[in-house]
Image (cartoon, grey):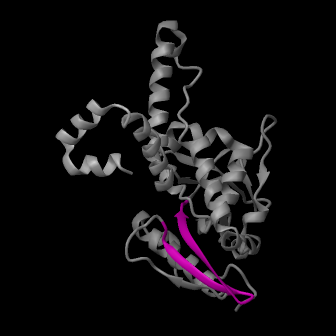
Amino acid sequence: MTTNFPIDPFPIVDPEDFDKNTKKKYTEDYIDENLRSQGWSLYEPYVDKGYDRIAVKNIKGHKITRYIQVKARALSKGSQNKYYAGYTLGPKDIISDPRIVFVIFSHEKILDNNVRDILFFPIVEWLKFIKEHSGSLFTSLGFKQGDGKINDTYYDPSSKQWTWGVGSSRRKAIPLVKFINKNGLQLIENDEPEKKFLELKKWITNFRDENIYDLRLTKNHPILKRPENQDLLNNTKDTINNFIKIKNISPEQSIKTIKANNEIFNQNEEAKKSAIKYFGNLEKEIIEI
């Protein structure tokens, strides 16, 4: 295990030679080799399940597993001579598994300096951080659709520091020191996701339902300023939210809901006969749950 981190596993390779398609593979292999240098065993999924590598390591006699989703992005010049890494995340990426880790990496040459920092964001840490510092992200259309760039991860070549936000008189830049390189490694080597798996899994599910799957109406759209439209749109919003909640309830909650509905349904004999007539044995099974 090397004490240096990150390392450059491909010293004769110039990442600028890759196009956007092959650079993804280069970046995944770069992260792969760096984690191997720290004692992790890495596996590449045969089927795309939303993560690029499965990382396994023994920590004090206990096996921990992390599902790594790599975000490879070029650094683009923003304001104040700082550069940002724009990447996409959406609701489909917020999986109820505390072992998920988002990794951001950009191998770029800026002002004669090779930027090789690796940012590790365990999913629970990422959700808490964004909620505190940029909660409106979860209600944005781009995030909801999964195609909006998140352009708030900035690199300052003069200080060689990463921040959330470029920094201004209205909004301070938030240091990302705890997520970078060796500090980030310490975060993903914390065995809390294993020790508190069910608790954290439930926390992610509740966070997702309350902050991401909760559709809200914008206050500024001209159509909402017309009183005659407000009730209609609010009813539409409530209908969609109720549908989303039904789609995302657990099997246990689903059975509980069916049983509660059946108590009402079974009180009407005519309704039962009609359902059995049209749906046959399948309906018999359902109403007997």
Q: Residue at x 69, y 72 (%)?
A: 188
Residue 194: % across, % down: 66, 73
Q: Is 52 one of the magenta-colored residues?
A: yes
As drawn, is 207 to the left or to the right of 180?
left
Counting every numbered tag in the picture gives: 0
Residue 191: % across, % down: 71, 75
The answer to whether residue 122 of the structure is visible from this angle is: no
Q: Nearer the viewer, residue 67 or 115?
A: 67
The answer to whether residue 161 of the structure is visible from this angle is: yes
Q: Nearer the viewer, residue 283 or 2?
A: 283
Q: Is 284 one of the magenta-colored residues?
A: no
As drawn, is 159 to the left or to the right of 258?
right
| Image quadrant in which you'd find residue 177 | bottom right
Residue 226: % across, % down: 51, 8
Residue range highlighted in magenta: 51-74
Residue 273: % across, % down: 23, 36
